[in-house]
Image (cartoon, rainbow, N blue to C red):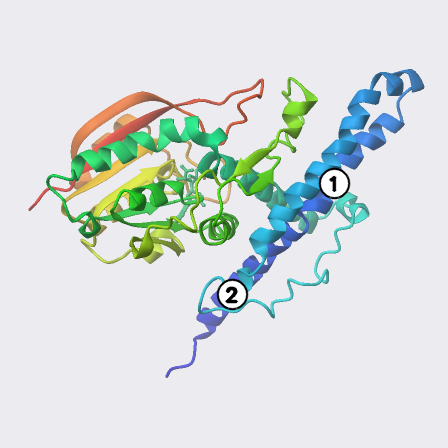
Amino acid sequence: MSSPSPVDEIDEAKEREHFRAVVNAFKYYKLCSLDRIHKSEKIISTLLPTHQRRLEKYTTYLTKFKKCLDVNNTIVHMIIKDVDTMFENVDHSMDGVNGTESFGCDYNACEMISQKQHKMQHDVEKVQSVLKNIVRDWSSVGAPEREQCYKPILDEIEALYSMEEYSERRGVKVLVPGAGLGRLAWEVAARGFTCQGNEFSLFMLFASNFVLNRCPEANKYTVHPWLHQYVNNLTCDHQLQSVTFPDVRPARDKPADSFSMTAGDFLKVYTEPEEWSCVATCFFIDCAPNVIEFIERIYSILQPGGYWINLGPLLYHYSDMPTENSIEPPYDILLEIIRDVGFDIMKERTGVKTKYAQNPNSMMQHEYSSVYFVCRKPYC
Ligand SMILES: C[S@@+](CC[C@H](N)C(=O)[O-])C[C@H]1O[C@@H](n2cnc3c(N)ncnc32)[C@H](O)[C@@H]1O
């Protein structure tokens, strides 16, 4: 057996460091979020007594926020319980995630401005986003969003591979890259297809592991997903709103061995040509610095006659990152590229109204006019 090269060792060390940073973000979620509540309390305490009196009701709510934060923190800790051994081949338990050695984030420390703390704050915001993604994928509150985003894809897959023509649906292999918390991939598998979700964010992977493998009962758990949204609230109760999850029993009703999730970069994990019957992408293709790489790879891994179904906007994620070489072709150019790569475009729609992890009570609502298309890789 050959020993790992220095490059492999550096990559592994970086991976371990990243793993530890993500686990730490979950661990410090409460302290850093509490810091924001304390900031409001502190500001109120410096106001004129008359103003303080006028804010008494709001101050009472701030106390309630802390109780909700405890509820969220319980879930956050459940999510990271056992993640050390989540990826079968790597044990992270000795990576130093258990102590506070690398980042003492009591709230005084959170007030100190340093690069490390900015990164921690940024990572904690990702934990807060994970709570909203739980609502999108695994709660009844997220059902309208899933109706907009996942149903068109699920209906298409069912129509393309109808029961009449494909009585053995297990033979149809569907890949969902950028699977987020896994609901779309789970729904595809629940319809009898073989489906694999792929995701590279550890924040998402930790949370999907919890929901998919450790939630045998429906609506057993509660989160307060909008607790960290301090603006555009109609009422204090909206900010405190609780949402139960999961709306189904993902761990118990798991579609046997026809469902799986893989961890890693789509471009690195999927290199085998002509492996998949269908690739379904939802809010994903704009996650590439160079979208052409995604399109070419989807084409290459599809079997001849295979389908690519896509829904989402073109919110190119790397666009505003100064250190990234991002290209952002608009949709008309993208369609030309898709044809040029070799796909036949079977269906194509613009203006598809879709939301992404929206707070339904917020005074601000982001809505995308997404594109939807179905392409086919021709037989040679
Ligand atoms: C906008 S989210 C959409 C998630 C899910 N499809 C949905 O509709 O809720 C995009 C997801 O793709 C993941 N992602 C981005 N680039 C990826 C890559 N190269 N390989 C695997 N996953 C990736 C991100 O981590 C993120 O979870």
Extreme residue toward the right, this view: 49
Specify the label residue 105 is tagged with: none
Q: Position of residue 178 (x, y in %)?
A: 39, 45
Q: Position of residue 136 (x, y in %)?
A: 47, 34
Specify which label sits upstream in the sequence, 1 or 2.
1
What amino acid is labelled 2 in the image? Thr
Can you tell me which quadrant of the image ligand 1 is in? top left
Q: Residues within 10 Å of mark 1 (few under 14, many from 20)?
A: some
Q: Residues within 10 Å of mark 2 (few under 14, many from 20)?
A: few
Decide if ligand 1 comes within 8 Å of the CB at mark 1: no
Where disc 1 sits, the SS reads: helix
Residue 340, visible in the rendered structure: yes
Which image quadrant is residue 284 in?
Answer: top left
Residue 22, visible in the rendered structure: no
Q: Position of residue 268 (x, y in %)?
A: 35, 57
Which image quadrant is residue 317 in?
Answer: top left
- According to the image, label 2 marks what residue? 85
Q: Are marks 1 and 2 in contact (CB under 8 Å)?
A: no
Where disc 2 sits, the SS reads: helix
Which image quadrant is residue 81 in?
Answer: bottom right
In this picture, residue 144 sits left or right of residue 210: left
**Viewer-closest of 114 and 22:** 22
What amino acid is labelled 1 in the image? Leu
- According to the image, label 1 marks what residue? 34
